[in-house]
Every structure is written in C-alpha cells, then in structure tokens.
Image: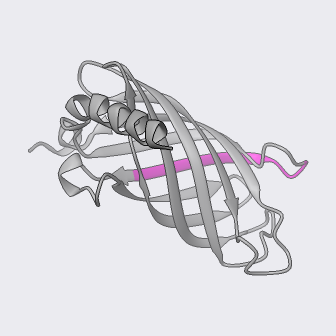
C-alpha cells in the first residue's frame, strides 16, 4: 500500500509543473448520446472550466450544459483533475451532479442525475485542447428506474482569455 501511495504522489508531482499553468477554458463538444441503446441521439456540450488558481484541493471545478437532438437537457456542476503525460497529453477524470430533463428522449428516472467520465486530450502550444470524452449519466438509484446513458463526445477546449481578453 505504501508503494502505491508513493507512486501516486510521484505521478501527481510530475504533473504539477504542466498543470500549474492551466488557464480557464470554454469547452465545446459534439458527439453521440446514449451509445448503447436504440434511442441514441446527437449531443452538444458547453462547459466553463475554471483555472488552476480556483482549485479545490487538487480538483478543478467546472459547470456546463448538455443538449440532445431529441430535446434532452442536462445542466451540471462538477470537478475534474488533470493528469498530464508529458507536456502534450492530458487525461481528465471527472464527476458532476445536475438536473436532467428528458424532452422527447430517454427517461432516466429522476431529475437529479450524476455524471462520471474521462476525457483524453492533446494540448497545443496555445494551451487549447482537442480530445475525446466518454461519460456515463445515472441517477445512482434515486429512483427505481435507472437506465443510465453513455456519451462519446469530441471536445475542443479554448483558453477563456483568448475569447474575451484578460
């Protein structure tokens, strides 16, 4: 167990120099909603990811909204952690909670839904990122009906100050 903790500490220490520079991001995504069911739809995603200066311990907060082509909506807030592999590659496991409206799409059983996911992205010189995000949304048993959905989304994250200046 001690070796595992030392290994994790070393991994975190190796990621700190790259992570310390990360700005706030506006992230836009498009992809496939409900991958493993016949009620699949398109998905669009918009997120604001706070800068490294706003960390909660080593987690970076974010807020966002997802909309599907069948009228589903999901507004959420959560946390993620960037794990860098060198200077260019970053994996971001994340977790969020939010409110879901199914529109004409899949009934997830409850208005409160939890999202867990992993994004793997390539980081460019200007700090923007292009990656793939895989997420699972579920109500975690808050209702007897809990089918869950999975999404695969192509995400482009642009530093916020590139859009709106300093």
Q: What residue do we see at 85% from left, 75% from top?
A: 145
Give the percent coordinates (x, y) of residue 154: 56, 33
The residue positioned 70% from the left and 52% from the top of the image is: 69
Placement of 59 over or under 109, stated as above or below? above
Residue at the image point whose x is 29% and y is 61% from the top: 56
Residue 67 drawn at (x, y percent):
60, 57
Is residue 39 covered in magenta?
A: yes
Q: Is residue 39 left or right of residue 141?
A: right
Q: Is residue 49 magenta?
A: no
Q: Is residue 150 left or right of residue 76?
A: right
Placement of 96 over or under 157, stated as above or below: below
Q: How is the image coloured?
A: one colour
Image position, residue 113 (x, y; %): 64, 70
What are the residue bounds of the magenta stretch? 38-47
**Where does residue 157 sit, x and y in percent of width and height?**
38, 36
Q: Is residue 8 above or below residue 100?
A: above
Q: Is residue 157 left or right of residue 45?
A: left
View extreme (left): residue: 166
Magenta span main SS: strand
**Nearest the eye: 59 or 71:** 59
Near-viewer residue (79 or 159): 79
Residue 77 or 85: which is nearer the viewer?
85
Picture quadrant of residue 16: top left
Quarter of the image where the C terminus is located: top left
Q: Answer with the quarter of the image where residue 78 lies.
A: bottom left
């Amino acid at each position: 167990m001690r070796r595992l903790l030392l290994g994790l500490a070393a991994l975190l220490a190796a990621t700190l120099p790259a992570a310390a520079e990360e700005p706030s991001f506006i992230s836009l995504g498009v992809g496939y909603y409900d991958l493993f069911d016949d009620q699949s739809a398109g998905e669009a995603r918009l997120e604001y990811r706070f800068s490294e200066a706003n960390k909660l311990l080593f987690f970076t907060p974010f807020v966002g909204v997802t909309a599907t082509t069948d009228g589903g909506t999901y507004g959420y807030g959560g946390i993620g952690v960037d794990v860098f592999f060198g200077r260019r590659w970053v994996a971001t496991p994340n977790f969020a909670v939010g409110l879901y409206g199914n529109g004409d799409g899949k009934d997830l059983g409850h208005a409160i839904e939890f999202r867990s996911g992993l994004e793997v992205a390539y980081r460019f010189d200007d700090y923007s990122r292009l990656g793939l995000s895989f997420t699972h949304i579920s109500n975690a048993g808050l209702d007897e009906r809990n089918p869950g959905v999975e999404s695969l989304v192509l995400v482009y994250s642009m530093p916020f100050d590139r859009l709106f200046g300093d």
